[in-house]
Amino acid sequence: MAEILAKISEALQEGESDDVVELVKEALEAGVSSGDILQKGLMAGMDIIAALFKEEEIYVPEVLASANAMKAGALVLKPYLAESGAKSSGKVIIGTVEGDLHDIGKNLVRMMLEGKGMDVKDLGTDVTPAMFLEAYKTEKPDIVALSALLTTTMPKMKTTIDAFKEAGVRDNVVFMIGGAPISETYRSSVGADIYAPDAASAAESAIAVIERKKA
Ligand code: B1M
């Protein structure tokens, strides 16, 4: 098992999307769990890319190729992620905040929510507060989920929540936030309701919100 996971990680680091897709399928056929493929294969490769990027040993084009390979691999895993456990109905709008183009984590959160039976409207990346508000008006979601990966864009979470306050609809939704620079302390400072550190806990928290509403 360790060998195929290492191969997935290496193919991702090389940005070889086709190889990643084939290796993920191979691993699934060999009985490796979707969680292990995600964590010990795809994410392990992405962690190495992140470290190399930080050290300026690789640059945006290489990171982008690996990001695309990550997306391709995650898409194969989609039907297997969150296939077990509690399921719930409920509506979520999700997006990466204004100015931020990172979407891998946000896409994983979306996949996990969908895997739990939720109806998810994905607004994509670089989503302005006005776009979130507009989507709220048409979709009437239970949860508004905000992702941010940059310290320069995290303040847009507060701007988005403030826009809902100004429109008088803040208390109609639950705001869930997440992303690498986000923390529980930050959640409290921007007035969001839930901080989820990863995609799996985001799905669990969303289920809890819907169950509480039903009770
Ligand atoms: Co960028 N980038 N990037 N990048 N990038 C980071 C974030 C950075 C930390 C790298 C570094 O320097 N060490 C750094 C930010 C530094 C800072 O803010 N202090 C950085 C920078 C600087 C930049 C640019 C400015 C670089 C440049 O242009 N010079 C630029 C900004 C572009 C923009 O957004 N305007 C940029 C561009 C890019 C790429 C386009 C090349 C690419 C993104 C491709 C894409 O997403 N389609 C990219 C990538 C891939 C990264 C790193 C290497 C990896 C991010 C990732 O996808 N991780 C990243 C380094 C790092 O994070 N350590 C980095 C895998 C993913 C699964 O994890 O997104 O954290 P993550 O999601 C996790 C959790 O955070 C959580 O769940 C997921 C796991 O289960 N989560 C949520 C995420 N959202 C959630 C929402 C929730 C709940 C949980 O509820 C709603």
Image (tube, rainbow, N blue to C red):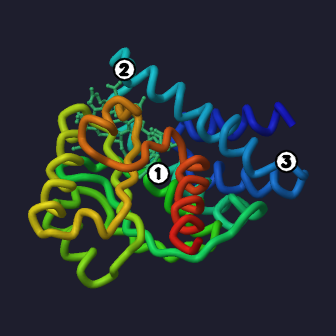
Image region (quadrant) for ligand 1 = top left
Q: Residue at x 31, y 70 (%)?
A: 172
Please tell me whether residue 67 is drawn above or below residue 5 in the rendered image.
below
Residue 87, image x and y in percent? 68, 69
Residue extending furthest toward the bottom: 138
Residue 85, image x and y in percent? 76, 61
Q: Do the CB atoms of the residues marked 3 and 1 lie less than 8 Å apart?
A: no
Give the quadrant of residue 44. top right
Q: Amino acid at mark 2?
A: Lys
Q: CA distance from mark 2 to mark 1?
A: 19 Å
Q: CA distance from mark 3 to mark 2?
A: 31 Å
Q: Residues within 10 Å of mark 3 (few under 14, many from 20)?
A: some
Disc 2 Cβ-to-ligand 1 distance below 8 Å: yes
Q: Residue at x 23, y 80 (%)?
A: 137
Which residue was labeled with disc 3?
A: 32
Disc 1 Cβ-to-ligand 1 distance below 8 Å: yes
Name the quadrant of the C terminus: bottom right
Q: Amino acid at mark 3?
A: Val
Which residue was labeled with disc 2?
A: 54
- Comes first in the chain, label 2 or label 1: 2
Drawn side of residue 36 relative to residue 39, left or right: right
Which residue was labeled with disc 1?
A: 68
Drawn side of residue 209 relative to residue 85, left or right: left
Residue 50, image x and y in percent? 44, 27
- Comes first in the chain, label 3 or label 2: 3
